[in-house]
Amino acid sequence: MKPITIISPRFCKLMSVFIDVYAITLYPFIISKERLPVTIYNHEKIHLVQQRELWVVGFYFLYVWYWLKNRFKGMNGSDAYYAIPFEKEAYTHQEDLGYLKERKPHAWRDFI
């Protein structure tokens, strides 16, 4: 499935509560401030796969859970975001444009 990409600087600003949001993936949409570089687009496509394999709701539940858990560990909002396993996987592999073809299901678990 090809993602539905929307450019909306206003929406990204609205979503920038804890960190500055350049792009966000809300299955099946990728919403960004501007046209995305290929590596960031790949990062967001990794999130689409993560969301699909966790039936979307599971992804959002776990995403918030990991962020809160990291905050309770004493991390600031930005560090808590970067420590989320979904983000770790996406940032680690965003430059590997062939990653999604070889990715094993639930590969984000390797980053817990």
Image (cartoon, helix red, strand yellow):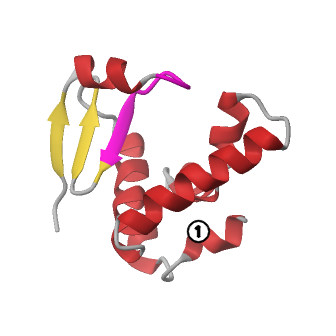
The relative height of residue 12 versus residue 112 in the rendered view (above or below) is: above
Q: Of 37 and 78, which appears nearest the observer?
A: 78
Q: Residue 24, position in %: x, y?
A: 36, 39
Q: Secondary structure at mark 1?
A: helix
What kind of secondary structure does the magenta stretch mostly adopt? loop
Q: Residue 82, position in %: x, y?
A: 66, 41
Q: Quadrant of residue 63?
A: bottom right
Q: What's under tag 1, amino acid-wise?
A: Trp
> Is 23 in the magenta?
yes
Q: Quadrant of the C terminus?
A: bottom right
- Magenta residue span: 17-25
**Where does label 1 land, which residue?**
108
Q: Residue at x 48, y 23 (%)?
A: 17
Q: Is residue 95 left or right of residue 34?
A: right
- Given the current orientation, which residue lies at the most extreme right position? 74
Q: Residue at x 45, y 79 (%)?
A: 102
Q: Residue at x 49, y 50 (%)?
A: 95
